[in-house]
Amino acid sequence: MIVNWFRYASPVSFYPLAGRLARGFGALAAVFAAIGLWIGLVAAPTDATQGDAYRIIFIHVPAAWMAMIVYVAMALWSAVALGLNARLSAMMAQALAPTGALMAALALWSGAFWGRPTWGTYWAWDARMTSTLILLFLYLGVIALRQAIDDPRRADRACAVLALVGVVNVPIIYFSVQWWNTLHQGSSISLTAAPKMAMLMLAGLLVMTAAAWCYCIAASLTRVRAIIVERERGSGWVASLIDIGTSP
Amino acid sequence: MKPRTRRFVWIGAGLVAVAAAATLILSAFRSNLVFFFTPSQVYAHEAPQSRPFRIGGLVLGGSLERVPGTLTVRFKVTDTAATVPVTYTGLLPDLFKEGKGVVAQGAMGADGTFHATQVLAKHDENYMPPEAKAAIDAAHAHSGAMSMPSLHEARAQ
């Protein structure tokens, strides 16, 4: 079967598909989060050095990963929007920014509450934490820049450039713990080495990561539907959508 | 070249330029980006002499002494090659332990002792249940490795 992917580059055909996908991923996120939280808070053993404080890992690490992944996704959509002049891609980039900002804020906030009992401080200006704070500011900057420009097509281009410039920060965050002495510990999980944590802890972390992925996809697709309706309100199909009063 | 291709080339060139700029900036500020200096760096005079800095390493096993009746503690920070004595008055974080990572902020005194104003514990990337830790410690003790007396556990009891 040949699928014509470009069909979905049009908001008219993407709108109902996004709705179906958002509902599916939303349900998956709830299921994964329920299983992941049960493993993390009930089934997983206590850590030998950190005690139960380590359980913040099940929120902190998925949020930090998603903050970086969502940024890369936003930059990719921005590149497509700039290169192909595709308005739906710009809308996707716009829809991803608040979700990414939420994930970055969650990572910083949970990290502060982890740092207090383990390191003895809420915050330190080490490379990992500072670069993650810059990531949050980049997200907020992209959101603010969009609000500052009235013409949506000009706002698309300006935000795309800012998102692409900021993407250099992502490898800096990831490798900061290897390049410099930091207070933050190194990676427990990497693609090249065996995980440095107990099996059940790892299982909980991976399930929570799946939940975070599904949540981010569901939230951004729901948001992109709202953006489509808002920005295409002049077109006939959106008007007919509102007349009928149902969502396909 | 199609206009579309040209735009993608410009985006790619822009990204390369930004990445190059970031690399240059980061390498220029390399010494300012380290969170702490190791004892070896301190003795090699790589750490700042006149202003406060952070020193990081492992708390040397058996080096922790408390001054009776005060909150003052003395311990040694080591990177296994060099060792710096540290003195600190205040509460130590829960994870502070002999043989574990530590980052202390302060300045070198004329007596060669590091006077810390803040002590942070640095934990590692290993997560394991207490049973696994006990098994590893037992294996170490069996193989004749130095066993570290644990203040943290003594306090918790």
Image (spheres, coloured by chain):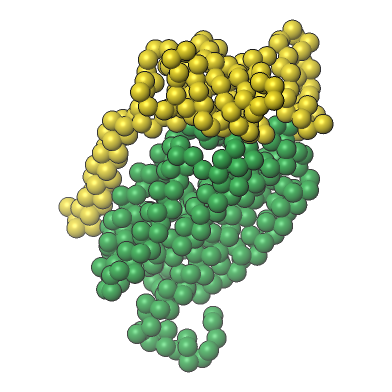
Chain in yellow in the render: B
Give coordinates of residue A225: x percent, y percent.
Answer: 47, 73
Identity of the residue drawn at 78% across and 24% down: B134
Identity of the residue drawn at 42% across and 84% down: A238
What quarter of the picture does the C terminus of chain B occupy?
Answer: top right
Q: Is A180 left, or right, of A218 in this rendering?
A: left
Q: Is residue B39 above or below residue A223?
A: above
Q: Is A220 left, or right, of A23 in this rendering?
A: left
Give coordinates of residue A120: x percent, y percent.
Answer: 60, 37
Identity of the residue drawn at 51% across and 54% down: A105
Give coordinates of residue A109: x percent, y percent.
Answer: 55, 51
Question: Which image quadrant for residue B19?
Answer: top left
Question: Which image quadrant for residue A52?
Answer: top right
Q: Is A77 left, or right, of B121 in this rendering?
A: left
Report the front residue among A174 and A21: A174
Q: Is residue A33 above or below residue A111?
A: below
Report the front residue among A122 and A136: A122
Q: Colour of chain A?
A: green
